[in-house]
Image: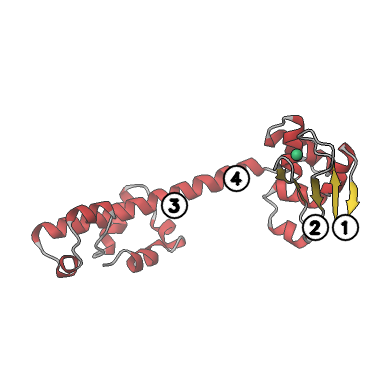
Amino acid sequence: MKSKANNMKEKIDLAKLVKDRLNIIDIIGREQKLIKVGSNYKSLCPFHNEKTPSFTVNMQKQNYVCYGCGKSGDIFSYIMEKYKFSFREALEKLAAEANINIKDHNFSDNANKSRKESAHYHTVMKYIASYYNENLKRYLIDNSMPFLEKKNISLEKVEKYQLGLSNNSNDLEAFLNSKSVSTEYLIEKNIFKVNSFKKKI
Ligand SMILES: [Zn+2]
């Protein structure tokens, strides 16, 4: 069983919270008869027709697997499969059973926020890669680069692998600022440091 301290750390993950509060043996045991066999519980599979039980529930792992039809999962997939529920519906049902008020938790907003944040980060990284790449291509018009020639790296490869040349990071900063990426953001995310290390050839 996971500790309560762990729960607190992962408070944005409602599904985990619900799972921690519920026991798969209770949830499934209410729906169908479970027989204890060793450290597991067995029953006839609710998802396919069978005469001998191959549906096995593991209390330690809080999951189930059917050795007949191959269906497996946790309390969420069980409820989804059994009642043809969406994940959201299963979450609502199980949260209610765990005495957790979904409305108290702004989980989808949090999830959205972090998705947006990582998309933004990804975009910034792309800006930087293209900036360095343009830099290198510009440089290669007038100059040769023995290192690249030695490695047999053509201009096409420079383009394809987005190889870049890092020179003046002030220019990069201005470039990113012009793309509405603030310097504070870049520092906060350690992006300058990462890139002078990563993008230099
Ligand atoms: Zn089955």
Residue that numbered label 1 is attached to: 38
Counting residues from the start of the chain, the first of labels 2 and 4 encountered is 2
**Residue behind mark 3:** 121
Q: Which residue is mark 4?
A: 111
> Where in the figure is residue 178, as x and y percent of width and height?
31, 48
User: Secondary structure under badge 4?
Assistant: helix
Q: Quadrant of ligand 1?
A: top right
Numbered circle sitting on residue 179: none
SS at mark 2 in the image: loop
| Three-letter code for the amino acid on which mark 1 is drawn | Gly
Report how far apart the C-alphas of labels 4 and 3 lie in the structure: 15 Å
Q: Comparing marks 2 and 4, which lies closer to the viewer? A: 2
In the shown orientation, is residue 62 left or right of residue 178?
right
- Tell me how far mark 4 sits from mark 1, CA to CA: 40 Å
Q: Residues within 10 Å of mark 1 (few under 14, many from 20)?
A: few
- The answer to which of marks 3 and 1 sits earlier in the sequence is 1
Horizontal side, residue 146 vs residue 81: left or right: left
